[in-house]
Image (cartoon, rainbow, N blue to C red):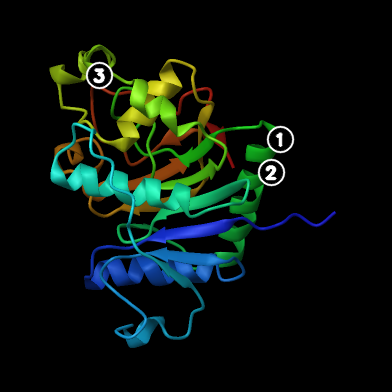
């Protein structure tokens, strides 16, 4: 039986030369998927010429939670993320930060094969979320969105049950070196650590990836937000006080 390809949400809300390069790469990777461009800076009439060769549907941010204690940037991110959840009716979907992430390869067929393997693992293990590992080595085992496969069946009311005590517990250790900010990623990570959601992480072995807008406080550990994974090690990590070995539960593809 042929596997049905999930929908892909490409989130794009920064317009710069580098962000456009990132977006085009993701369009090429997912060219055989149904793409939804979650974007508030373009509409169909004002679509830039470089996007006119691609097929996609624009999704505007509309979900506006009122009770998350986030700053304006993190609140916008939460609204964008949850809008994607409420605009998808498939069992699962890709959620990609397409304006500040990219792989340093143009072997798109290899990337498609690896992403397809990630989909198979996601289904076989009945996961709620399966994310490319950004921070679990450099930020106290912190799970995050970014390049992520998500279940549509997550009970989002769980987010309403996170309180100040949960947040204090989550950030107590992190204050020693750098702050884990209140945002939608951290809320999902709290639910993972409390075993309310089955969220796992993966890496792509022997590939290089960049999170171009990674916070400057991480530069001493991971200069320029560049990740290279090889033999279950984050080889681009420069920190002397962190272990570059990938955690045992992270799946290498």
Q: Is residue 210 above or below residue 178?
A: below
Sequence-wise first label, 3 or 2 = 2
Sequence-wise first label, 1 or 3 = 1
Q: CA distance from mark 1 to mark 2?
A: 6 Å
* Residue 157 percent coordinates (x, y): 42, 29
Pointer 2 residue: 120
Q: Would you say 42 lies left or right of 128 here?
A: left
Instruction: Examine the image and state in which quarter residue 96 appears.
Output: bottom left
| Mark 2 element type | helix
* Residue 179 percent coordinates (x, y): 16, 27
Residue 245 seen: no
The residue under the point 18% across, 43% down is: 215
Which disc number belongs to residue 124?
1
Q: Is residue 176 above or below residue 229?
A: above
Q: Are marks 1 and 2 in contact (CB under 8 Å)?
A: yes
| Quarter of the rendering occupied by the C terminus | top right
Q: Is residue 68 above or below residue 211?
A: above
| Mark 1 element type | helix
The residue under the point 63% across, 46% down is: 91
* Residue 158 percent coordinates (x, y): 42, 25
Q: Residues within 10 Å of mark 2 (few under 14, many from 20)?
A: few
Q: Nearer the viewer, mark 1 or mark 3?
A: 3
| Mark 3 element type | helix
Instruction: Examine the image and state in which quarter residue 45 appears.
Output: bottom left
The residue under the point 23% across, 39% down is: 66
Seen from the viewer's position, the closer of residues 239 and 30 is 30
Pointer 3 residue: 167
Instruction: Examine the image and state in which quarter residue 61 appears.
Output: bottom left
Q: Nearer the viewer, mark 3 or mark 2?
A: 3
Judged from this view, the residue extending furthest toward the right is 1
* Residue 252 percent coordinates (x, y): 56, 37
């Amino acid at each position: 039986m042929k596997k049905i390809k999930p929908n892909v949400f490409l989130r794009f809300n920064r317009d710069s030369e580098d962000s456009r390069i990132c977006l085009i790469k993701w369009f090429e990777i997912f060219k055989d998927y149904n793409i939804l461009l979650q974007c508030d800076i373009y509409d169909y009439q004002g679509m830039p010429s470089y996007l006119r060769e691609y097929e996609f549907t624009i999704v505007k941010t509309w979900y506006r939670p009122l009770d998350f204690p986030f700053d304006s940037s993190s609140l916008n991110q939460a609204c964008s993320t949850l809008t994607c959840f409420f605009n998808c009716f498939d069992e699962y979907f890709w959620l990609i930060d397409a304006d500040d992430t990219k792989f340093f390869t143009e072997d798109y067929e290899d990337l498609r094969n690896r992403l397809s393997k990630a989909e198979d693992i996601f289904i076989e293990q009945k996961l709620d979320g399966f994310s490319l590992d950004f921070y679990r080595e450099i930020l106290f085992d912190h799970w995050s969105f970014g390049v992520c496969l998500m279940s549509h069946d997550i009970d989002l009311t769980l987010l309403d049950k996170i309180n100040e005590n949960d947040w204090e517990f989550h950030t107590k250790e992190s204050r020693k070196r750098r702050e884990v900010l209140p945002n939608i990623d951290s809320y999902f990570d709290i639910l993972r650590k409390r075993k309310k959601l089955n969220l796992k992480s993966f890496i792509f072995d022997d590939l290089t990836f960049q999170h171009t807008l990674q916070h400057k406080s991480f530069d001493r550990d991971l200069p320029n937000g560049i990740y290279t994974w090889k033999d279950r090690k984050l080889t681009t990590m420069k920190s002397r006080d962190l272990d570059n070995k990938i955690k045992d539960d992270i799946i290498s593809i």
